[in-house]
Amino acid sequence: MEKVLTIAGSDSTGGAGIEADLKTFQEYGTFGFASLASIVTMDPTTGWQHEVTAIAADLVEKQLISALAGEAMDAVKTGMLGNEQNIKVAARVIKERGIKQVVIDPVIACKGTAHILQPESVEAIIADLLPLAEVATPNLVEAGILSGLGDLRTVEEMKTAAAKIHHLGAKNVVVKGGHRLQGSQAIDVLYDGSTFTVLEGPRIDTDFNHGAGCTFSAAVTAGLAKGWTVLDSVRVAKSFVAAAIEQGVSINPYVGHVWHGAYNEAERRMHHE
Ligand code: PXL
């Protein structure tokens, strides 16, 4: 069975982060591993403000040593690493172990907060993580920050940003238009260094998108682990997330969660006599 590792943050509400990653890995029939790098908490008394607490770097490294003790991992993804030190530890271990199928989700800001990572973390993502990426999966805001282009409003601007992020070292870049790009379609741009592929899907009119980004990058990672091409991994991940958004679940009054099991109708899976 393929083995897939996430190095990311915890979202105890079960929608995003390591929770989304492990659920997604399971849906793909892969064996999920996790090294926790941060804990994100949300405060119901302050309008669901997010707070990121980083896990100590030596503890992140100990988890990575545990997770990587067996046969080689088939693919690894990174998410919310919490600070610069954890970015550097994750990058060093990935490099030392020679892991090739690496998906970098450059989590810089998420919907609940204006500035989750410090500016030096953006620099560390660029310096240490992007060069390791088989696939990088920035959303529109992150692609604007990483490319230095600022606000991205059109597919052409998404292409320019993807090319710039490729130039920073990511072999393949998917810029996700998501709900932020105006228009009737959900558009992603994939750039592999020579060809731009514009992926379109129906735009789903819903607020149930908490966890969509993490789920997408986890799905791409599991696809790569299964030996699929980058293009197939991205295409299937897009369908997987579209189903998860379409069948989102109401968990609390603050955000709408995606349902990671939607694509496979996981809620119907367990039976007893
Ligand atoms: O969506 C970015 C994100 C990533 N990782 C964790 C999160 C969030 C957003 O809430 O909680 C753990």
Image (cartoon, helix red, strand yellow):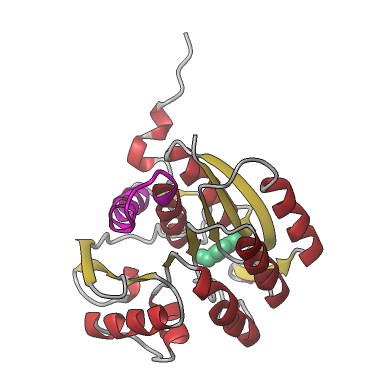
Name the quadrant where ligand 1 sits: bottom right
Question: Residue 247: image x %, image y %?
Answer: 35, 46
Residue 174 counted in the magenta span: no
Task: Please state if 255 lies on the left or on the right of 245 as rendered.
Answer: right
At a point 52% along the width and 50% down the height, the residue shown is 21
Where on the picture, by quarter, is residue 164? bottom left
At a point 73% along the width and 52% down the height, the residue shown is 65
Q: How many marks do you count on the picture?
A: 0
Question: Residue 168: image x %, image y %?
Answer: 45, 82
Question: Residue 144: image x %, image y %?
Answer: 41, 85
Residue 121 visible in this rendered orientation of the protein: yes
Task: Please state if 190 lies on the left or on the right of 97 as rendered.
Answer: left
Where on the picture, by quarter, is residue 159? bottom left
123 and 141: which one is in front?
A: 123
Q: Which residues are magenta?
A: 224-244
Q: Is residue 20 above or below residue 110?
A: above
Residue 14 visible in this rendered orientation of the protein: no
At a point 41% along the width and 60% down the height, the residue shown is 209
At a point 51% along the width and 57% down the height, the residue shown is 253
Q: Is residue 216 above or below residue 119?
A: above
Residue 236 counted in the magenta span: yes
168 and 23: which one is in front?
A: 168
Question: Residue 132: image x %, image y %?
Answer: 52, 69
103 and 237: which one is in front?
A: 103
